[in-house]
Amino acid sequence: MLDRARAGDLDAFEQLYHEHVGRVFALCLRLAGDRQRAEELTQDVFVQVWQRLASFRGESAFASWVHRIAVNVVLTEVRSRRRREARVLTVAAPDALERAREGSGSGPEDGMDLEREIAALPPGARTALVLHDIEGYRHDEIAQLTGVAAGTIRAQLHRARQLLRKRLER
């Protein structure tokens, strides 16, 4: 099926898509923390998979190759978004921030939702936690993927675990 997709067979590519879309979407959702963005990123991943399919050399499993593209797509988008946000100064009224906190729906009566709590982590901490604890990357691999020092990744991972522990104890 992979060879047919590499030769341009859209039906074969569609089968590959259906085999891998669930895992790619889960990764995008965990890293992005937002369902709509995750859906967009998942589509971006498969556009890149299609465009790069001819360059897949088979040195690793196809699933690993797709996973690596997904991580790179999400991290590139996160970096790009951070640069855009850094150029824009957003000022919110204190009462608007308070209303946003009150309406977050994260009280104990809502039950524990681990995915929601992971999504609520700061972006750097969330990325470190997802890539290390969920996806199994080593600190040095995450550092290479994100362009952040391995020591910073360790600190962000520690922070993520602490924040998650506090949020889940409530």
Image (cartoon, grey):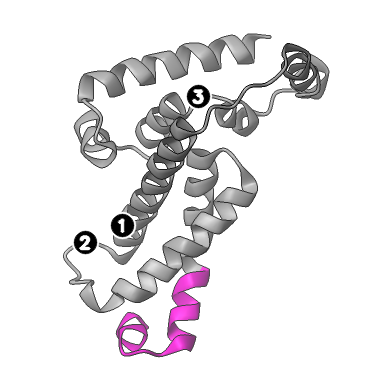
Q: Quote the CA–CA distance across marks 2 and 1.
A: 6 Å
Tag 1: amino acid: Ser
Q: Are marks 2 and 1 in contact (CB under 8 Å)?
A: yes
Q: Which residue is mark 1?
A: 64
Determine whether the residue tagged by mark 3 lies in a helix, strand or loop: loop
Nearer to the camera, 87 or 25: 87
Q: Earlier in the sequence, mark 3 or mark 2?
A: 2
Q: Which residue is mark 2?
A: 60
**Residue shown at 25%/79% (left/top)?**
54
Q: Which residue is mark 3?
A: 122
Determine whether the residue tagged by mark 2 lies in a helix, strand or loop: loop
Judge left or right: residue 45 versus residue 90.
Answer: left
**Residue shown at 27%/35% (left/top)?**
142
Q: Which mark is residue 12?
A: none
Which of the two marks, 3 or 2, is nearer to us in this view? Answer: 3
* Residue 58 lies within the magenta run: no
Q: Are marks 3 and 2 in contact (CB under 8 Å)?
A: no
Tag 2: amino acid: Ser
